[in-house]
Image: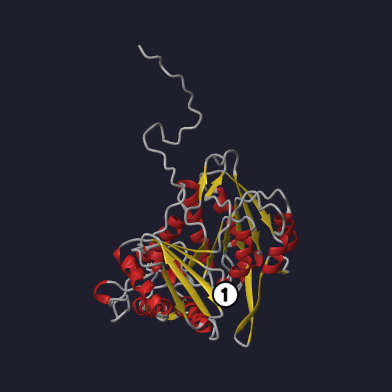
Amino acid sequence: MPERLKSTVVFDDTNGMQRVPDRDYDRHRSVHLCFTRSAGGHGPAGYDVRAWGPAFPPRGDGSYRGWLDGAEVVQEAVAVLRETWQEHLIRHVHRDPRPDGPRTVFPFVDAGEGGRVDCPHLDGIGLRLARAGNDLFQLLFYGGDTGMREIGETLFRALDGGECIVTVESDDLFVPWNLLYTAGGPAGDAQGRLVDDTWSFAGFWGHRHLVEHNFSRVRGYDSRISVPEGPVGVGLNVDDRVDEEYPPTPFVAELPGIFDRCARETAVTVRRSKSELAGAFRAMKFDDHISFFGCHGQVTDQDGAARSSWLELADGEKIYGSEIAGWLSRDEPMPMRPLVFVGACQGGQLSSAFYPAAGYHLLRNGARCLLGPQVDLPRAFAREYATLLFGTLLDRGSRLGDAVRELSRFYADDRGNPLGLIFTLYRGLDVHFWPRGPE
């Protein structure tokens, strides 16, 4: 009779042998695009573009590579897309007829915890947003040389064929990828061009696909936020004055309660000054698993070009991206490698200047990922979005990319609100909370 082997179960992640453990922490991307800015020989600056992944199968005829002219034109087109969303969502206003007299409303800004957005102009607004996203898609992927057009054709076939996992890598080009739009079926042509007035939320990249922006490679990256014992550390870097702006809307004041209500235990640290934030970032022991910015953001312009950008906490002192880079300039990265969420007023302006600078340094020096809006963030919406996002991550154990897409679909399909699409994920599609230390 064979001897029975002795064993001890140290950790069972199969729920009592009811499921097979998932060891694929980082999913393979079906589309990988890389944009590198170059002087372009004797011509104007442009982008050297490479593409690979299962959507771009090698056939022995070389790699997928193209050239996109006119870096300045591309930057202008990106700004136009952001401004279109800003104008037609954040600044959109209409007169709401009521029995007691009409009133002026901002239907998307005022939307918070509640039902479907009541906006009779949604179809027209959605068409404008779809056209703007489609115009930028056409410029990026069909506005270059023959190699670029081949990338565009292959990419569109993949996107139109089903859900894709997309990583766009660049240290130079920053696009609100979730806001790009490709038209499939009878509403579009062979290259995804929107040819009539028919649009749907499913055409936006952020509604159908999992999309992230990535920077150049960082060694030692791990998508698992390991919390083997004790609470999840949450750092709230805030400016209480945000809630006092007209109309007064509780957002910052609600943040501690958002995390207290999560089923998973959290330990919240509130920072209200530049010195507190600097001390935390400089410290060798940095306890944030989540670093949340609920504050002011600002960008100053000079002759149409971004000159500088900063955040402000409650003390009103400006926090520049270059300063954050200095605080993080040490041999060891931040120990907890936090998930960084930027919920800043005027956050859309930050997307053109602050995210590329501060986001780059955060991700190069230990932050696991950064999530931030591409247009200004209404406070009522921000409060509910944060509640749903972190509840999904902490209570259900979802991956960050899936949670972001789930919320995009929820707001679009259930609420009729395109604002769920405005967030860009800088690295971190697969980031999730892991119940034990790295193996």
Residue 243, quarter of picture: bottom right
Kindly tell me whether residue 326 is visible in this rendering: yes
Q: Nearer the viewer, residue 122 or 332?
A: 332
Q: Where does residue 241 sit, x and y in percent of width and height?
A: 65, 67
Q: Nearer the viewer, residue 40 or 97?
A: 40
Quarter of the figure with the N terminus? top left
Q: Where does residue 176 sit, x and y in percent of width and height?
A: 48, 71
- Classify 175 as above or below 362: below
Amino acid type, residue under disc 1 in the picture: Ser
Residue 145, quarter of picture: bottom left
255 sits left or right of 400 in the view: right
Q: Where does residue 49 sit, x and y in percent of width and height?
A: 47, 72
The residue under label 1 is 352
Residue occupying the point 46% across, 80% down: 84
How many callouts does the rendering have?
1
- Classify 124 as above or below 60: below
Kindly tell me whether residue 102 is visible in this rendering: no
Residue occupying the point 38% across, 65% down: 207
Residue occupying the point 55% across, 77% down: 38
Q: Secondary structure at mark 1?
A: loop
Dot 1 crowding, Cα within 10 Å, few <14, some 14–19, many 20+: many
